[in-house]
Image (cartoon, rainbow, N blue to C red):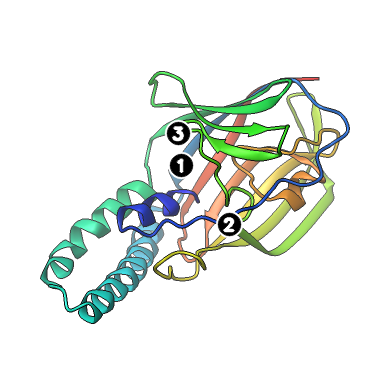
Amino acid sequence: MKTFKWLLSITCLIAINKVQAQNIPSKQYLGTVTYTKQAKITDKATFNKTSSIFIKTIADSLMKQMMALKTKLKEDTSEISATTEPFKDLMRQEVFKMGAQETLIDDLQKDRIVNFIIENGSDKRERFNFNYTDSLVYNSYNSEEIEDYFDNETIISLKEFKSERKLIKGYNCFKVIYVYQENFDKEEFRMPEMIIERELWVTDKIIVPFHSIIRNQSILSKYYPIEITEKIHNVNGYETKYTIDSISIN
């Protein structure tokens, strides 16, 4: 759920941690992988109830911390209370993007892996690139290193279901379910506990050190995710699915 990093930046909450990719495979793949990202409500009544509580918990926590900081600095706190509801509305729009469709493209080149995005039919734009020379990920907007790219997830549990199989784009995939917590420890403000569950359909026939959706190296060192379904704990009736449109790598 990288949206939360964006939300933290709105309130000056972004911080950086340095990390390098590990376990670079001996075989370097070339080609292109394209995903479609689509979020949907699966149970409207349940979603409306649980998402409202979820948004309120996060907004109230951040606002309380900002209030405490401004009070400590002897600054005016009136504007914080006035912006609470608009902030909740903004969070709801950014976290739960109903009907929005994104296309994610990972272009595996000789010296790097480049990620592109197409949002709602807009022009393709470059977001990230993984450099094989130094095993680091860079922001394509400003060429600066994204130092926490592989370091913002703590896996709580991971289970493989190798007997459950699905053929996806010619790959005999098996299911993996993992639960992780978003790491906000080094941010200026503390986020409430953020736990995400992902169901992956993976192949162990491909090992690539970079993936624009899955950013955990312990997973990428073992298999390549082909299909992904993501759910937020405590928000029921809502899911985000990443479906592969095409994969052409060798």
Tell us which disc is closer to us: 2 or 1: 2
Which sits earlier in the primary sequence, circle 1 or circle 3?
1
Is label 2 in contact with label 3 (beta carbons under 8 Å)? no
Please state the horizontal and vertical placement of residue 121, each as a whole percent of the image: 39, 21
Q: Nearer the viewer, residue 244 or 32?
A: 32
> SS class of the residue under badge 2?
loop
Please state the horizontal and vertical placement of residue 47, each as a whole percent of the image: 39, 57
Judge left or right: residue 130 versus residue 56: right
Above or below, 173 relative to 41: above
Q: Residues within 10 Å of mark 2 (few under 14, many from 20)?
A: some
Q: Residue at x 77, y 47 (%)?
A: 22
Q: Residue at x 69, y 48 (%)?
A: 20
Q: Nearer the viewer, residue 64 or 38?
A: 64
In which image quadrant can residue 181 be found?
bottom right
Please state the horizontal and vertical placement of residue 17, each as a whole percent of the image: 56, 56
Amino acid type shown at disc 1? Ala
Which sits earlier in the primary sequence, circle 2 or circle 1?
1
Q: Which mark is residue 142?
A: 3
> SS class of the residue under badge 1?
strand
In which image quadrant can residue 247 be found?
top right
Q: Nearer the viewer, residue 211 or 158?
A: 211
User: Which residue was labeled with disc 2?
Assistant: 152
User: Which residue was labeled with disc 1?
Assistant: 39
Q: Residue at x 16, y 74 (%)?
A: 75
Quarter of the image with the C terminus is top right
Amino acid type shown at disc 3? Asn
> SS class of the residue under badge 3?
loop
